Amino acid sequence: MIKHIAVSGNIGSGKTTLAEKLARHYHWTPLYESVEHNPYLRDFYSDMTRWAFHLQIYFLNSRFNQVRTIRESEKTIIQDRTIYEDAYIFAANLHRSGHINDRDYQSYLDIFHSMIHFVQPPDLLIYLKADIPKLVQQIARRNRDFEYNIKLEYLKTLNEHYESWIRSYKAGKLLVIDVNNLDFVERIEDFSFIVNRVELEINNLFS
């Protein structure tokens, strides 16, 4: 039985929406990223340097609790973003950009490496590949006021980290879906295309 599917991708790539639609389609249990109730996110987009470390610790702890939920559950769970992305994409990018200093970054990595020993990779990781224009379009469409301050350069460097991580990902089965020309919300054929790709990967897990 497949127990854990994860959807990964940059801000605005459509992760949460796809996780929701696949959960309904397959009767999976969705686990979403804590955005609306995140006490640091709004402050972070206003002042990244001041709040970056706090935000990343919050996400890391939240994601680790999700991993524990997945491990203890008897259901098939689809997760919106993984614990790997917290460390390898977002924290790494904030450190490289100077928003997290060396001392705090090392403390963060120490916590992450302690946690990762208890983490099993997803049975299937779905990566939504999207270029900057697509990300900007979808961020604008969902109209969250605290995301108005997101800089294009920030999205660009996140994409670079994502591409690097996906190229080296060996933890488990990986499905890359280029969503630049897809609209799986408005076009049923685009969602069917993704479902067919997912079905193929799921079937291969049992072959």
Image (spheres, rainbow, N blue to C red):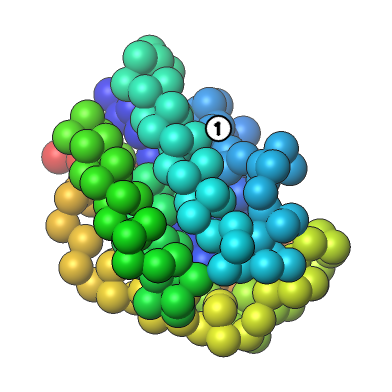
Left or right, 44 with reference to 23:
right
Q: Is residue 146 something that shows in the picture? A: yes
Which residue does the image show at 41% across and 61% down from the upper left?
91
Q: Amino acid at mark 1?
A: Pro
Left or right, 6 with reference to 205:
right
Q: Quadrant of residue 36?
A: top right
Which residue does the image show at 16% across and 57% down from the upper left?
170
Query: With respect to residue 93, does 5 lie above or below?
Result: above
Q: Quadrant of residue 121?
A: top left
In the rendered image, residue 184, in percent from the top left (x then y), is placed at 64, 60
Which residue does the image show at 31% across and 30% down from the upper left?
2
Left or right, 19 with reference to 157:
right
Q: Which residue is mark 1?
A: 30
In the rendered image, residue 8, in percent from the top left (x then y), is placed at 44, 56
Which residue does the image show at 66% across and 81% down from the upper left?
151
In the rendered image, residue 49, in percent from the top left (x then y), is placed at 57, 68
Query: With respect to residue 54, does 153 lie above or below?
Result: below
In the rendered image, residue 1, in percent from the top left (x then y), is placed at 28, 24
Query: Quick one: 39 or 117, which is closer to the camera?
Result: 39
Query: Quick one: 112 or 102, which is closer to the camera?
Result: 102
In which quadrant is the C terminus drawn? top left
Q: Quadrant of residue 60?
A: top left
Q: Residue furthest front?
A: 103
Query: With respect to residue 116, does 105 lie above or below?
Result: below
